[in-house]
Image: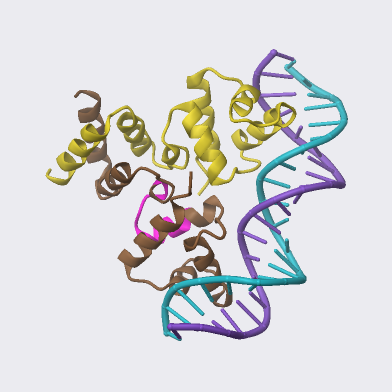
Chain colours: A yellow, B brown, C cyan, D purple
DNA sequence: CGACTAAGATATTCTTAGCCA
DNA sequence: TGGCTAAGAATATCTTAGTCG
């Protein structure tokens, strides 16, 4: 029942090659508070509201649902689907439903 | 940037055929507060913490990531994947990565 | 009955001000 | 530099006590 958010956030930030502070600043956070806030999110001390989670996801290039995903296989599927355009996603959905 | 949580929660609750209060009680909430809390979540007045979201998802039979998903096609893929067993999920992931 | 809401009580996050490797 | 943290300030949710259709 532990939140997957801290781990997913860290994985996505590392993949994007940013520091905690840099990521926060890119979201428009005060440079003086960005470091503390991001660290609190990644260490699981605090959880951001949805709007902040969405902006984090956008900045990191992952779907916001990925950050909350507690299933590792599903999380990889979400990442793989993220790079598809709309019609490819719809084709995949039809493939799943018909097999 | 509006949270998808209220809409996804309502869709899943309706699909499960429960009232707001009933769902809250099933999670172990005080029957006196279950109605107000669930209504606040569905109307978007307040957002629950992750632990509560996870218990809601489990009770409703959807992946917790579904409740936070802002992409309609992806949300349907998440629901379709949810009914698969582990090996079928892994097969699907391989299919996606190799096509 | 089921959905919904205001407002105060309560619990959370955010900011400040740092330390540690 | 980058990661991290305690504690008070600020802001959020939860509970109470209802209304409305």
> Residue B89 in the image: x percent, y percent?
26, 39
Q: Which residues are magenta?
A: B54-65
Task: Please state if C17 lies on the left or on the right of A75 as rendered.
Answer: right
- Up the image or down, A42 lies above or below B41; here it is above
Q: Quadrant of the C terminus of chain B?
A: top left
> Residue B10 in the image: x percent, y percent?
39, 62
Q: Quadrant of residue B9?
A: bottom left
- Up the image or down, A77 lies above or below A17; here it is below
Q: Main secondary structure of the magenta part?
A: helix
The residue nearer to you, when weighing B78 against B28, is B78
Task: Please state if A43 lies on the left or on the right of A80 as rendered.
Answer: right
Number of marks: 0
The residue drawn where x is 55% and y is 56% is B48
Q: Quadrant of residue A46?
A: top right
The residue drawn where x is 42% and y is 41% is A65
> Residue B84 in the image: x percent, y percent?
24, 46
The residue nearer to you, when weighing B5 against D19, is D19
Q: Quadrant of residue A66?
A: top left
- Up the image or down, A25 lies above or below B69; here it is above
> Residue B87 in the image: x percent, y percent?
24, 38
The residue drawn where x is 28% and y is 43% is B73
- Up the image or down, C11 lies above or below B85; here it is below
Residue B81 is a magenta residue: no
């Amino acid at each position: 029942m532990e939140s997957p958010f801290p781990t997913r956030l860290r994985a996505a930030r590392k993949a994007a090659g940013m520091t905690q502070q840099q990521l926060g600043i890119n979201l428009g956070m005060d440079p003086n508070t960005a470091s503390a806030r991001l660290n609190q999110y990644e260490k699981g001390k605090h959880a951001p509201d949805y709007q902040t989670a969405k902006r984090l996801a956008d900045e990191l290039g992952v779907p916001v649902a990925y950050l909350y995903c507690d299933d590792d296989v599903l999380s990889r599927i979400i990442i793989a689907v993220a790079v598809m355009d709309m019609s490819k996603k719809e084709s995949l959905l039809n493939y799943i439903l018909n097999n």
